[in-house]
Amino acid sequence: MFSCKNQEMPVSYLRSDMRIDRLSDSSYLSDVRSMVFDRYLYVTDYERNQIIKLTPQGELAGYLGAKGKGPGEFLGASDIIVQGDSLWVYNDGNGSFEVFRSDGHLQTIRLPDNIDYSGGFNFFLFRNRLFMSSVSETNSLCSFDVKTSAIEQFGQPEVFDTDIQTRIRNHLHLSGTDSCIFAVSDNMPVIEKYSHSGQLLETLDYSSIPIVRERLAVISENTTPNGYTLLVEDVCYNDGKLYLLLYANRGNRISCSDILVIDVSDRNMSCQRLLNLGDSWYETICVSGIRLYAFSNNGLERFIID
C-alpha cells in the first residue's frame, strides 16, 4: 500500500471558457449523469433518455436513443463509455447495456441476475469483458464476458459493522487501460489497481490530503445504519491520470468542485495536485487532453487544464 504525503496539495484554479445550458435546437440539458469524449463529446441525459452528441466547441451534432422499452431505448440513460467505434450505455430502468455506433443502435446486452450492478458507478470494457462493481459476501468486483457469458469475481470487500453497510459502501467506480483496472470507492479514500485477471497490484491511500481528511470526519459522523456520506462524486481517466471529483467541507459550506489528480502512469500511483472549478456544484466530469468538461447546475462547462 502506498499513501499520499501528509501535505498541502498544489491547487490550480480553473475558469471556464465555454458554458452551455441550452442546445442549438432550443432544448435544455437537464440531468447529465455521465460524459465521454472520443472526437465528439457524448453526454447521457437521464431525464431525456438520450445520448447527446456535441462537438468539442459544444455545438449539437445529433442524438442517439429515446425513451421507451424497445431496442436502443432508455428508462434512464446512465453511465457511458467508448470502446473502439462503439458506445456502451447503461440503461438504468431496464438493467441492460445498450450498444450504439454512429449510425444507430447495435445491440442490447442484459446481465445475469447474479450480477448485482447498479447505475451510477463507472464500468469498464476490455476485450468483450465488462468489468463492474458487484458486491457479494466475498467479492466487490466482477467481469462478465459478453460473448461466452462467463462470470469471474474478484476484489476483497471492506467489512463494516452491519451487512447493509458492507453491501452499500463497497461499490466502486472503475476505469482502466489495456494493462490494468483502477477501482475507486465513493466513500473511502482508497484506490485499488488490478490486473485484468483480478490480481491486486497496488493500493493507494489518499486520506492524508487536508480536504479529504476533513471530509472523512464528516463521513464518520453522518453514517447511518442504512446510508452513508459521499467522498467522491465521479471519476474519469485520461492519459495516465485519474481525476476524482471530490466533496469538500470548508467551515459550514459543502462543495463539489475540487478534482484530485492522481498520476497512475508510473509503477506507483501518486497524488499530483488539486483542480478547483469555482463555486458551482458539479455532478460529472470528463477529461480529454487539456480540456476538462464538467456538468453543474449552471449547465455544461469547459475548462482548459494548464
Image: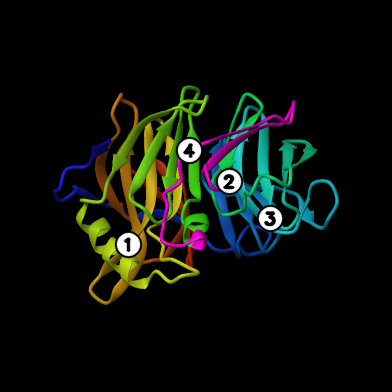
How packed mark 4 is, by other alpha carbons closer than 10 Å (few <14, some 14-19, many 20 or more), is many
Q: Does residue 33 appear anywhere in the picture?
A: yes
The residue identified by callout 2 is 134
- Do the numbered discs 1 and 3 sit on residues whose CB atoms are within 8 Å? no
Rendered position, 218 above or below 116: below
The residue identified by callout 3 is 92
Q: Distance between the residues labelled 4 and 3?
A: 24 Å
Of the two numbered discs 1 and 3 on the same chain, state the one appearing first in sequence.
Answer: 3
Q: Where is residue 49 in the image (x, y as percent from the top left)?
A: 71, 58
Q: How far apart are marks 2 and 1 (CA)?
A: 34 Å
Q: How far apart are marks 1 and 3 (CA)?
A: 31 Å
Q: Which residue is drawn at 63% across and 27% down?
A: 84
Secondary structure of the residue carrying tag 4 is loop
Q: Which residue lies furthest to the left in this view?
A: 7
Q: Does residue 306 appear anywhere in the picture?
A: no
Q: Which mark is residue 278?
A: 1
- Do the numbered discs 4 and 1 sit on residues whose CB atoms are within 8 Å? no
How packed mark 2 is, by other alpha carbons closer than 10 Å (few <14, some 14-19, many 20 or more), is many
Q: Nearer the viewer, mark 4 or mark 1?
A: 4
Amino acid on which the number 3 mark rests in the picture: Asp
Q: Nearer the viewer, mark 2 or mark 1?
A: 2
Q: In this view, does 8 lie to the left or right of 65?
A: left
Q: Which of marks 2 and 3 is in front?
A: 2
